């Protein structure tokens, strides 16, 4: 699915709220994709996480957004499959290297927000419940962008032959930031549980 068709995916997924969001237990082995943020105001920010799940043998996806809303989608969801497909392509790009191993957008000011994408490769299917508490053979690939902003792609220096942020990174990060959209109040219980898993994985 093209990124143009994926636009508005978060609004569409809001139609699938989890019937009992506080019963959802995020597991390291089930993580598919996540985005974290770091700024002066909030150094441990959370944007979004997507987990895989099974219910009576049926594949499902669980999305937790920036407000802690837990959304339960069928494994056939074209929106989630599209996001994961883009994530797979982005994770296959060579790392930028340099300070913080980040793609750094050119800004006049300093102290910009860093967005970090975590993408899990491999499969957690078929392993016992104890192993599913941990990543096992799954690997996380991190992609960071310093100073991401809509309409801005020029880099401070050429990276891997690029003078601008690669288009697929620009588009995927913009799509994932939709996780901030929509009314509601923060569900701190859910956010803290998910961040506990992500912060551990982020330091592996």
Image (cartoon, helix red, strand yellow):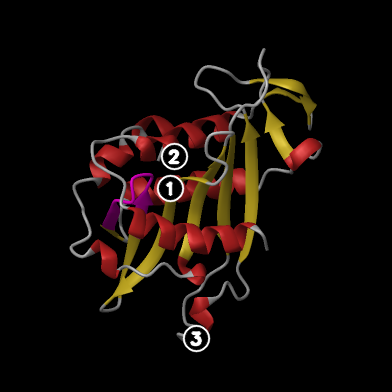
Question: Residue 18, percent across and down?
Answer: 22, 60
User: Please, is residue 96 above or below residue 92 in the view?
Assistant: above
**Residue 164, picture quadrant:** top right
Q: CA distance from mark 1 to mark 2?
A: 7 Å
Q: CA distance from mark 2 to mark 3?
A: 30 Å
User: Please, is residue 78 above or below residue 175 in the view?
Assistant: below
Judging depth in this view, the residue of 88 and 189 nearest the camera is 189
Q: How many marks?
A: 3
- Look at the image and give the residue range highlighted in magenta: 62-72
- State the SS at label 2: helix
**Residue receiving disc 3:** 130
For the residues labelled 1 and 2, say whether their Cβ atoms are less than 8 Å apart.
yes
Question: Residue 196, percent across and down?
Answer: 50, 62
Give me the residue at 51% from left, 64% from top.
Answer: 197
Task: Name the chief secondary structure element in magenta.
Answer: strand
Q: CA distance from mark 1 to mark 3?
A: 25 Å
3 within the magenta span: no
Mark 2 or 3, nearer chain start: 3
**Residue 46 visible somewhere in the drawing:** yes
- State the SS at label 1: strand
Residue furthest top as drawn? 108
**Residue receiving disc 2:** 176
**Residue 96 visible somewhere in the drawing:** no
Question: Residue 13, percent across and down?
Answer: 26, 46
Give me the residue at 55% from left, 75% from top.
Answer: 134
Between disc 1 and disc 2, the foreground one is 1
Q: Is residue 105 left or right of residue 38?
A: right
Residue furthest front as drawn? 41
Please tell me the numbered disc located at residue 48. Answer: 1
Question: Where, quadrant-wise, is the N terminus in this rendering?
Answer: top left
């Amino acid at each position: 699915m093209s990124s143009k068709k994926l636009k508005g995916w978060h609004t569409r997924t809001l139609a699938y709220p989890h019937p009992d969001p506080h019963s959802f237990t995020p597991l390291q082995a089930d993580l598919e994709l996540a985005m974290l943020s770091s700024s002066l105001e909030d150094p441990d920010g959370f944007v979004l996480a997507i987990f895989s799940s099974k219910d009576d043998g049926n594949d499902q996806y669980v999305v937790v957004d920036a407000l802690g809303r837990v959304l339960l989608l069928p494994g056939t969801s074209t929106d989630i499959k599209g996001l994961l497909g883009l994530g797979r392509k982005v994770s296959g790009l060579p790392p930028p290297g340099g300070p913080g191993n980040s793609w750094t957008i050119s800004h006049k000011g300093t102290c910009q927000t860093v967005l970090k994408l975590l993408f899990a490769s491999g499969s957690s299917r078929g392993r016992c419940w104890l192993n599913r508490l941990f990543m096992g053979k799954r690997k996380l690939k991190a992609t960071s962008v310093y100073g991401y902003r809509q309409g801005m792609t020029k880099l401070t220096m050429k990276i891997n032959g690029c003078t601008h942020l690669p288009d697929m990174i620009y588009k995927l990060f913009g799509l994932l930031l939709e996780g901030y959209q929509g009314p509601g109040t923060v569900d701190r219980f859910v956010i803290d549980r998910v961040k506990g898993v992500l912060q551990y994985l982020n330091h592996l």
